[in-house]
């Protein structure tokens, strides 16, 4: 059954369907336009379609909203969304904004708002969900909540300190890092930095890995050295090294001094290599085992939650020591092969020695061809003594094959 009133934060992520029931995208935000009198009027939805393209769907093309779904007429303008001056994005720009109650009793922050359809099929802001400042010093305390209509509040300047990011972050809580990075890039620059600063360290590290270089630097410039060190320490070493290489030398050294010594040493090593070589692409955290380790021991290592799928696909076998730079490289055992052998089988008997390791100065064009020719997921990198010093993974190769603006390049042909 179609609803006549819906809270905007609950719409985010909902599927958008055409009349035949085919999914065409998902909701990213709702746009409203301010009026001289009365509450703002909803003008349409910002939705994401295939290829992460964001387009505008006028509210007049929404035929119904049901729990978890938005049904449209099926007519969608595929030109890239561009925000008009009179329009405001609810999720990106209104949630978190500080307001004052007209009776002077209190200030509060907007945590959500409802839009409601009228008999004329127009949608207007009908109710706001507000949270007042907390009155207890306890870190677990939260302020009192209340509902209000638009005429019961006065908005503060969206650029003041009261325009916090907590409500916006809450609406993004279920997004994957890549999708959150795309959502942040849709925000005004100041708002993007504000929201990024409010993310916890681990979440921010994941998002930074997905952002283009310019946005990475904008965010890192607003972090103090101590927090920057904590966040970089949580990033994949190759991504952290690429980011550090774009910082002023004085700042990068100051951050490195605050990092874990082992992590800092890895970054210093990676930063010495050219960006378009194996050394500049590789990660220094592959899964490494001894030849007499068993399949069961290797499987236990790749089951760890913090191991990315691309690194979990291969176990590299070396002589001791088993931290990069390791002892002499012996070969690789693929995850799929381990599945075909009993838990007590020794890795030394399963080695794939056909894959020739590469040197850190191997150019990226050679790496591309090697991955394509042999359908590889990861490629070992060794030094002159045949010690394993890192691994180039397929996701690193893809990042460099795509143009720098790949997140938005297919959106350039027009505007809303």
Image (cartoon, rainbow, N blue to C red):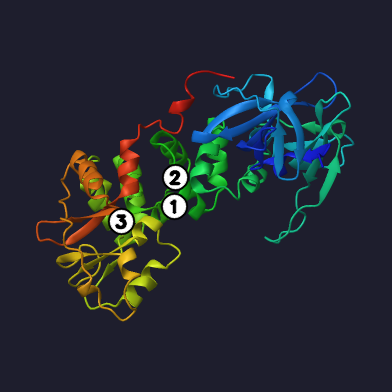
Whether label 2 touches label 1, CB < 8 Å: yes
The reply to whether residue 161 is in sight is: no
User: Can you give x and y, in whole percent of width and height, for residue 320 in the image?
Assistant: 19, 73
Front residue of 15 and 10 = 15
Residue 132, above or below 303: above
3D distance between C-alphas at marks 1 and 3: 13 Å
Mark 2 element type: helix
Residue 317, above or below 73: below
Whether label 2 touches label 3, CB < 8 Å: no
Residue labelled with disc 2: 208
Instruction: Please tell me how crowded label 1 is: few (under 14), some (14-19), or many (20+) other residues with Cα within 10 Å.
Output: many
Front residue of 141 and 49 = 49
Q: Earlier in the sequence, mark 1 or mark 3?
A: 1
Instruction: Please tell me how crowded label 2 is: few (under 14), some (14-19), or many (20+) other residues with Cα within 10 Å.
Output: many
Residue labelled with disc 3: 264
| Extreme residue in the front direction | 20
| Residue 90, quarter of the rendered image | top right
Question: Which residue occupies 85% across, 43% down?
Answer: 147
Instruction: Please tell me how crowded label 3 is: few (under 14), some (14-19), or many (20+) other residues with Cα within 10 Å.
Output: many
Question: Which residue occupies 83% across, 26% down?
Answer: 121
Left or right: residue 359 versus residue 276 is: left
Left or right: residue 387 versus residue 49 is: left
Question: Which residue occupies 51% across, 52% down?
Answer: 203
Residue 231: mark: 1
């Amino acid at each position: 059954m179609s609803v006549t009133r819906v809270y905007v934060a609950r719409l985010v992520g909902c599927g958008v369907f055409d009349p035949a029931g085919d999914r065409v995208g998902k909701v990213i935000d709702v746009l409203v336009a301010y009026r001289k009198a009365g509450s703002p009027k909803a003008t349409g939805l910002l939705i994401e379609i295939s290829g992460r393209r964001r387009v505008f769907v006028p509210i007049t093309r929404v035929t119904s909203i049901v729990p978890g779904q938005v049904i449209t007429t099926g007519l969608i303008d595929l030109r890239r969304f561009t925000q008009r001056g009179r329009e405001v994005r609810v999720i990106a720009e209104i949630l978190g904004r500080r307001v004052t109650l007209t009776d002077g009793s209190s200030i509060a922050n907007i945590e959500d708002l409802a839009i409601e359809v009228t008999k004329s099929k127009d949608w207007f802001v009908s109710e706001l969900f507000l949270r007042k400042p907390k009155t207890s010093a306890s870190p677990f305390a939260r302020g009192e909540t209340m509902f209000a209509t638009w005429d019961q509040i006065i908005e503060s300047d969206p650029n003041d300190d009261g325009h916090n990011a907590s409500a916006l972050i809450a609406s993004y809580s279920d997004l994957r890092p890549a999708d959150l990075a795309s959502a942040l890039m849709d925000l005004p620059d100041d708002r993007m930095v504000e929201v990024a600063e409010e993310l916890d360290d681990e979440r921010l590290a994941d998002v930074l890995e997905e952002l283009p270089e310019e946005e990475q630097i904008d965010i890192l410039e607003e972090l103090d050295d101590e927090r920057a060190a904590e966040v970089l320490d949580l990033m994949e070493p190759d991504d952290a090294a690429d980011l550090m290489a774009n910082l002023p030398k004085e700042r990068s050294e100051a951050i490195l001094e605050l990092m874990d010594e082992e992590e800092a040493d890895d970054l210093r090593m990676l930063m010495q290599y050219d960006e378009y070589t194996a050394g500049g692409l590789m990660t220094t955290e592959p899964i490494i085992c001894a030849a007499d380790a068993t399949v069961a021991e290797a499987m236990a290592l790749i089951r760890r939650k913090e191991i990315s799928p691309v690194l979990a696909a291969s176990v590299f076998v070396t002589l001791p020591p088993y931290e990069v730079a390791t002892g002499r490289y012996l070969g690789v055992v693929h995850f799929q092969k381990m599945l075909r052998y009993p838990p007590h089988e020794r890795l030394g008997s399963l080695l794939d020695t056909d894959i020739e390791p590469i040197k850190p100065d191997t150019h990226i064009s050679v790496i591309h061809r090697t991955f394509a020719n042999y359908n590889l997921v990861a490629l070992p990198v060794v030094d002159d003594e045949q010690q394993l010093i890192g691994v180039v993974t397929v996701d690193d190769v893809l990042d460099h094959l795509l143009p720098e603006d790949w997140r938005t390049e297919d959106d350039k042909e027009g505007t809303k």
